[in-house]
Image: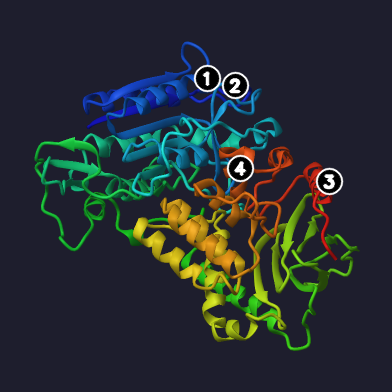
Amino acid sequence: MRKCAVIIGVNKVGTLTPLTAAVKGAKEFQRWVLSQNYDVKLHVDEGGPVEVHHIKDTISVFVDSRVYSLMVIFFAGHGILKSPNEEQWLLSKADRDVGAAINVQQSRLMARITGIPHVVFISDACRSKPENPLIMAVSGTIIFPNGLLPFNSRTKVDMFYATTPGDPSYELPMGDATSGYDGIYTKFLLKGLKGEVPEIIQQLHSPRTGGWGVMSGELDLYLQEVVPLALEESSASLSQMPDGEITSRNPMSLADFDQPQLPVVNNDMNPAEAVLDNMLPSKSDRKPDKSTFSRAELEGNIQNLIEADSHLKKENMYSVPGTSLVTIVGAGDISFMSEERIYQQSSGEHVLDLLIGTGTRGSSLLVIFNDGSIAPVAILSNFDVLLLIEKEQIVNISYSPAIWSRHFERSELFDDNISMARARIAAKARQGKFRIEGYTEELMWEASFLRNFKAFDPTLGLYACYAYAQAGNFDQVRSVYRYMIRDAEQILFDVSMLNSLFSPDFNTETIPSTIFPSLTQGWSYLPIKPELFHPMLRELSSHLKPALWTKFTPEGGRIFQEYLNLYPIEI
């Protein structure tokens, strides 16, 4: 089987600050793939704008040939992260055309229907929140053809990013970020791929081909170690921590070599750790990465969340059938609005308890922040809600069976497990993303742990579905959905949506209990099968604000209220 590569380099996007190294890096990457006998197509903006339809045409030719076992898609240029897992690679006309970008998450999903066993995305781009409202409106385009094959969990999709999405406090405005990433990532990426770091070259576990190669896992670990240190040594004012999501394993290699001269290394160490242990300063001498939480901070976050979770267990506060108790921690002077009334919070109380009518299918509570932005919260019948707010953001939403519901007594037996599962997820959310780290096996283990408690908190079923989708195990997405349907419990929109995208036998008559994606990243899935969803959702997606949980601009909040009127709640 053969290998192919689609290489994209865009220095200039409309009025954004021009880059100087994107095209240069793309051409250097092209020279390397040619040395490895890839079939390659280069798209750069030296001779004119890079158009998304040109890239789609290139990928269609490669996919339709049915002769490739590996496809690498490399991008160097401007990137934005509108919200967790809502990432766009900007092409030349992105400031004038909302579709003139590559929607990374959607394209990643569609890579699983190409029939290519191994697909790799490499992004040497910023992952900053856009400040330009024209860029914020970009929704991007899927670059893979549609309707080829069923979604395939055996297809391995690896993601390499030049930088991580940091906590919102540390994220850089795009204007500042562009000058700091002057091809450093591509430079060290190519060092590893060219065989200049022999300690990350491994013998291939393939009786048919044999040989030696560089696998994604070792390359990812090497980059995460070496790039930040290179920036420290260059006295750069910005920190850059590469990120990766690797699902492939040996013998799926990116670069192949004859038997190399390998140095003697400590057999107890990973090859990437061994080379870095020899060539870089000791870990005790390294500066802490300020873009992420320390272990102590994360542990503190988890403890705070567990304590907040216990607030729902107050003996003197409970809901009655047809209502839901909503406990808001960090309420401050924020306002809230349900279908029944407006709650103007002027007292500045830290903890606020509201009793909201749910009807038979549930309802919605709108959180109205001081800047006019609005975050909708799904109120489910038979469940009480805990809402945690910090710095004008919803940090966590969790549900507990109401004291009168049939799941209440059983949930009491698993209190500690449920609280820890919620806290682990929310601690990850404070990093600016919901994504479970690790190889496919680790993703599956974490998803299985979360789904065990989905009857007691529907958000855990939601998180499990996203984790299974991330790992490419769509059968388990369907399994979670079908269990929740059989159990006659509340189905969050996200769970129903993920099932509908990947299930060949999806029943369009099954109506979820909520009418919008709870997690912002869920909105990026809607264009994959737009015919399944209300067209107003497409309009709303252009009014999202960067956040883990769905949050709209003031104009988006107005449109959302119109959308709610299409679905009257039974009181």
The reply to whether dot 2 and dot 1 touch (C-beta < 8 Å) is yes
Q: In this view, does 417 lie above or below 118?
A: below
Q: Is residue 549 above or below residue 182?
A: below
CA gap between label 2 and label 4 equals 23 Å
Q: Which residue is drawn at 54% across and 60% down?
A: 481
* Residue that mark 4 sits on: 526
Local SS, label 3: helix
CA gap between label 3 and label 4 equals 19 Å
Query: In the rendering, which numbered label is found on residue 51?
Result: 1
- Name the spot of residue 219 as percent of width and height, x first: 29, 45
Amino acid beneath label 3: Glu
Local SS, label 2: loop
The answer to which of marks 2 and 4 sits earlier in the sequence is 2
Q: How crowded is mark 1: few (under 14 residues within 10 Å), some or many (20 or more)?
A: some
Amino acid beneath label 2: Lys
Amino acid beneath label 4: Leu
| Residue 391 visible in this rendered orientation of the protein | yes
* Residue that mark 2 sits on: 93
The answer to which of 419 and 224 lies nearer the viewer is 419
* Residue that mark 3 sits on: 562
CA gap between label 3 and label 2 equals 32 Å
The answer to which of marks 4 and 1 sits earlier in the sequence is 1
Callout in the foreground (2, 4): 4
